[in-house]
Amino acid sequence: MRIGDGYTGPEMIGTTAWVAAAIVLSIGLALTGGAVIWKQQRARAEAQALQERQVERLQDDLVKRLTMPVYGLKGARGTLAAMGGRVTRSAFRAYVESRDLPREFPGARGFGFIERVEQADLAAFVAARRRDGAPDFDVHGLGQESTHYIVSEIEPLARNAAAWGLDSGANPVRRQAIEQAVDSGEATLSSPTPLVQDRQQGPGFLLLVPVYKQGRDPGTPAERRAALLGLLYAPLVASELLQGATDQAASLLDLNLSARTLDGQFAPLLATRNGRPLPPAEAADASITEEPTAQSLRFTVAGREFLLEAALTREAAMGLLGLSGVGLELGGALLSLMFAVTVYLLAVGRARAEQLAQDMTADLARLARVADEARQSLQDLYDNAPCAYYALDADGRFLQINALGLKWLGSTAEELVGRMSPRDFFDEAGRAQFDAAFPRFKAEGRISGLEFDLTGRQGQARRVSLSATAVYGPGGEYLRSRSVMFDISETHRIRQQLHQLTLDQEAMLESDLVGIVKLRDRRSIWHNRALERMFGYAEGELAGAAARQLYADDTAFHALGALAYPQLRAGGRFRTQQQMRRKDGALIWVDLAGVELPGSDGSTLWMLVDITQSKAHEARMERAALHDALTGVPNRVLLADRLRQAIRAAERNGHVFALAYLDLNGFKQINDTHGHDAGDVVLKAVAARLLASLRASDTVARLGGDEFVVLLTPAQAPADVEPVLSRLLDALSQPVTLNSGELVAVGASLGLAHYPTDGRTPEALMRRADEAMFANKRAGRARASTR
């Protein structure tokens, strides 16, 4: 080694070269490592976002499939309400036949009606069904409970004959769902349970909607049970309900779908692996919770909790995450190595640099092979993505297309590239739309959301959504498109269903039977024509009108506002029956229901049904139930109520009162001699004389035949009553003129009881008066006397 001439020797040069190369390599590898980590994190975030979007779309689809039948059942409930709550076989069949069940409600075997029947009423119930056009109706599968829930109507009957007449309450799962629906007043989905009409006996559900008397929710569980008219229901077969639901996500995700049962566990409904649905036996044991990308989501539909578990398939995970950052890592490492080698070569000389250059060439060859493998992986992801990728030239012909696009079109790349256009697979309307849109796309460089009906060469049709951006040359000339096409067939079908639902709702809003009005600050901001007709106003007269003019008076207006609006503002619903005033001043009875519209700044929506005729009918029926049909005086039922009221009033005020039991003498002879019409004339004359002889506070009642009861309230003392009744007997003894002109006369035997001397209960007083009457009759006395 030489000293002093500036020569450091090969050892020093080699050490310096190695140190410089190591520093360069370390810096390069550090930068490469940071870039790789960033790349992997970005790929993982994109994969997770893609997975979450697929899971969210699948959840939305499942919720729609499970809740669509609710609209049909509520429509049936509205039909029942319009019919006064009476379920007839012909009307129920007509409603079900008016709906396209397979298209509107996929998975629903039909619509049915369940009625609550006590054990003691079964025979009468079966007889009534047979009289209603179902001579073959019978009940079966009865449970041990004294209360049964019988399927009295089910349509289409051919697909559901096994369920007709079935006691749904015999099965604990169905009974729990039925009782939950009745007590809550809401649509309820049962736990998974096999359906008798499903030959496969796979999991199924009962979707139940309770129907109450008078078409309204009474409020509390006890009131709901008392007012129950029955339950509308739809039997749902899980395999049919979920058919096709997972097709779009199956190539990307492994899925498990299960529902919570009565014991708190989750029962499997559906499982897919690598795009293939698993058999029920394998689905029960399938688990994906240990997968790195596992995700679970719980959601509730109609009171039933579901668990949706999802994870990327192994192929999707490898495609999205497996090679993420590999090319960057290898490229960065090799570039770092190249810089380090370059530095080293510059330090140690040309000869060694040449040798290292050869080695570096070999490394680059290996890098090229790795890059080619990465390219093939990306090509696989491109070809098998859940959408069609393609490019079009300036004439609209294909330049390239991925494998899924070729599958949709049923063609090979050789048949399409440079020869055919997407328009060749559209219908006539689609070709016209393409011809109008493509020139505009080439000029503007972007287009999105165009929808077409596309049919492949094998005849398979689908609805697609097309979006694209344009690639231009240096001079601004169009070169090619970057186009993507999504299959939106299922989304299009659901959108059409929602459109039909909107039309149905518009038809309901314009119903001739139900008046509807939207109020803000109790002033009309919208109403339908039925409201104007109900209240006798011309079209447009109620626009902007105050609600007060529809009420009978200010008191009724303010009372309803004080009662209803606090309940509406709390998120509740309000319903009542209210007497209101028409434009001509006539009063009508209205069934009134209101709800506050969410997000509407306090606006409320009210539905009104004219029930004047129903009210009049109820009044007539109530009078017929409480009054004697021949004489018009109170009958035994109303007498019992007034007697109880008299006892309570006497207990409060210290009063006494008297009860007289009266039996006509000689009435049978008149009936036998002159006929029953003459007997009716005598009974009506006796009732009229009794009413004319007594005070307004007294009650005259006919118990049946020739027996009457007189209730005298209040009385000062027992001694004051007997003269009154003696005069009453004298009036009854006066002759009665028959329709024939003949005169007949009857007498009366009368027994008297005093409260509280002769008894403190209705039964004791009636018994004492009856005994006193018979004592008088045996003694031949026609006067008032106590026993």
Image: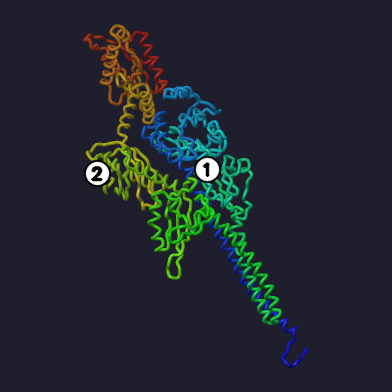
In the rendered view of the protein, which quadrant contains the N terminus?
Answer: bottom right
Question: Of residues 212 and 191, which is closer to you in this image?
Answer: 191
Q: Residue furthest bottom?
A: 4
Relative to residue 3, is residue 255 depicted above or below?
A: above
Nearest the viewer among 170 and 270 is 270
Q: Position of residue 207 (x, y in %)?
A: 49, 38
Indicate which disc residue 539 carries. Answer: 2
Residue 69 visible to the viewer: no
Q: CA distance from mark 2 to mark 1?
A: 49 Å
Q: Nearer the viewer, mark 2 or mark 1?
A: 1
Q: Is residue 459 visible?
A: yes
Task: From the image, tell me which residue sits under label 1.
Answer: 243
Observer-nearest residue: 94 or 366? 366
Quarter of the image holding residue 687? Answer: top left
Front position in the image: 448 or 76? 448
Image position of 344 (left or right of 673): right
Q: Residue furthest right?
A: 1
